[in-house]
Amino acid sequence: MALRFYNTLTQRVEEFAPTDGKTVRMYTCGPTVYHFVHIGNFRTFTFQDVLRRWLRAHGWQLDHVMNITDVEDKIIRSAMEERKSLREYTAVYEKAFIEDSVALRLERAERLVRATEHISEMVQAVEQLSEKGFTYKSDGSVYYRIANFPEYGKLSHSDFSGIRAGARVDVDEYEKADARDFVLWKARKNGEPGWETPLGAGRPGWHIECSVMAMKYLGETLDIHAGGVDLIFPHHENEIAQSEAITGKPFSRFWLHSEHLIVEGQKMSKSLGNFFTLRDLLERGYSPESIRYLLASVPYRKKLNFTFEGLKAAQTSIERLRNYKLRLDTEKFGEGGNEKIQERTETALRLFNDSLDDDLNTAEALAAIFEFVRDTNSSMDAGEFRAGNVGSALALLARFDSVFDVLRPTVMTQAVTDGDVEALIAERAAARKRRDFRRSDEIRNELLERGIVLEDTKEGVRWKRR
RNA sequence: GGCGCCGUAGCCAAGUGGUAAGGCAGAGGUCUGCAAAACCUCCAUCGGCGGUUCGAAUCCGCCCGGCGCCUCCA
């Protein structure tokens, strides 16, 4: 089955392949670095990570650009309050974002680009728009005149023809000709940081950075542009208006949008006390993998109800898979291979692939894996699973983990060395041999307290860190 | 008011015309010195009503209940 995505632009599921057949040129809207990125943002970034990994599983190369918005009203306000430069202020949160991303095993985009490092390109873009008659000035700021872009609204599927000038309260304190017009270049106000440019002293509007950076690195037409649903309007709509007005070509072939995350059934908000950053959750003792698993397990176009019960369930689910892999790695199976099991492995792999090809249906992909795990665990118990079946089973798990990436535990500090463990296991074995179960259990509990779990199997003791 | 989404077992959640995936939790059991791990069994007729159809969770209509965007926002 071919890879298909739901395209917001066409409102249809469409087959996807990169234009040149080799490299997927993708742009995703990254964080605004004025605070710690929250778990809802990471839902979107995790979706993008799964997307990246699955595109690569198809054999394509990636050229993925993610922006860092490091100039924007809230940043300016906060930086001024703290008497810091923009860079001083944003550096903290940018660093935190990257650390959090590493913890969640989010692959780094091929290019991570900052808005403030593309000011001159943005100025050029605004000038191009002016030359083509898409702009007007008001109070020293430059605005985009959407009336001159008839296709405005094609992404959000809204009809703006009825909107009249002055129909809305103007939130920007600037005079706009039309309510939907948006600012391309904001004139500097008293004491604000800004740039001296041919457009005047000021700073770029939010939308122009994405148009400029996307086209600078990826060309006039992208393969994929992705972000959260709340960006459809106005951000992505405005990006289209800017980019297509300049080039006359489609800005992006595919537009993918991830749904929001809610917490315990409610919208995440600071006032409700259900607002979490990754750091908050890690402090509560949840593992990065369990958070990653939970975020990835719900298909990206569905709202994700983030609950602590779900987080615990995620951790238990991961352990089940790790136990299975441990079993494959350590158990002695009979010689030869079992044809039936081989067929089931192939079926599971096919189901896994087909599910992800179907607009990244991660829930269905997981089901294929768990069904396979139960089925083959059962075969192992019955002695039907053979040494010849191990390889393909491990390959299936590897395929799974190349996307979900949760099998490897995040190593905290290793208080106990492997040697210590082995020595105690040997002592325990001796105790068990003389049926001294008191001493035997004592050792097992002692190890458990230090994070080592022992399992007695018919081939001897197996242990793991938890 | 405009546009759109959702409502499947205790929780999370697939399935979009042929008689309900998967995970977690729970109950009982097998195995084990005891555990752990694993396996087995049990646990829903899909918000409500009506319609279309041989047949609907899946299509249509109405109703009830959540929610998003339309303004900064992943």
Image (tube, coloured by chain):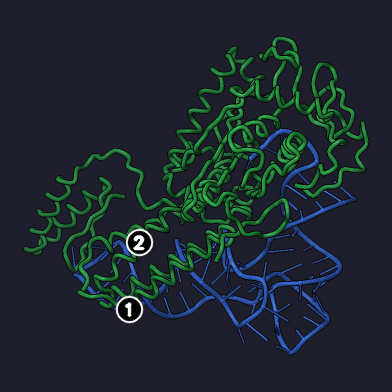
Residue A12, quarter of the rendered image: bottom right
Q: How many residues crowd mark 2 within 10 Å: few (<14), some (14–19), many (20+)?
A: few
Measured from the top left, where is residue A398 in percent x and y? 37, 57
Measured from the top left, where is residue A351 in percent x and y? 49, 68
Measured from the top left, where is residue A460 in percent x and y? 16, 63
Residue A137, quarter of the rendered image: top right
- Residue drawn at (55%, 47%), measured in percent from left and top? A24
In this rendering, does residue A274 appear at all? Answer: no
In the image, taking residue A197 as reference, residue A309 lies left or right, namely left
Counting every numbered tag in the picture gives 2
Find chain A in the image and tell me its colour. Answer: green
Residue tagged by mark 2? A395
Q: In the image, what residue type sits under mark 1?
A: Glu
Letter of the chain shown blue in the rendering? B
Q: Mark 2 falls within which chain?
A: A
Q: Is A277 placed above or below A309 here?
A: above
Along the viewing direction, whichever of A167 and A117 lies nearer the viewer: A117
Labelled disc at residue A339: 1
Q: In the image, what residue type sits under mark 2?
A: Ala
In this rendering, does residue A321 appear at all? Answer: yes
Labelled disc at residue A419: none
- Residue drawn at (25%, 77%), measured in percent from left and top? A383
Quarter of the figure with the N terminus of chain A? bottom right
Residue A387, quarter of the rendered image: bottom left
Q: Is A101 placed above or below A200 here?
A: below
- Can you name the residue that lies furthest to the top here? A191
In the image, taking residue A144 as reference, residue A33 lies left or right, namely left
In the image, taking residue B10 as reference, residue A380 lies left or right, namely left
Along the viewing direction, whichever of A33 and A111 lies nearer the viewer: A111
Q: Mark 1 falls within which chain?
A: A
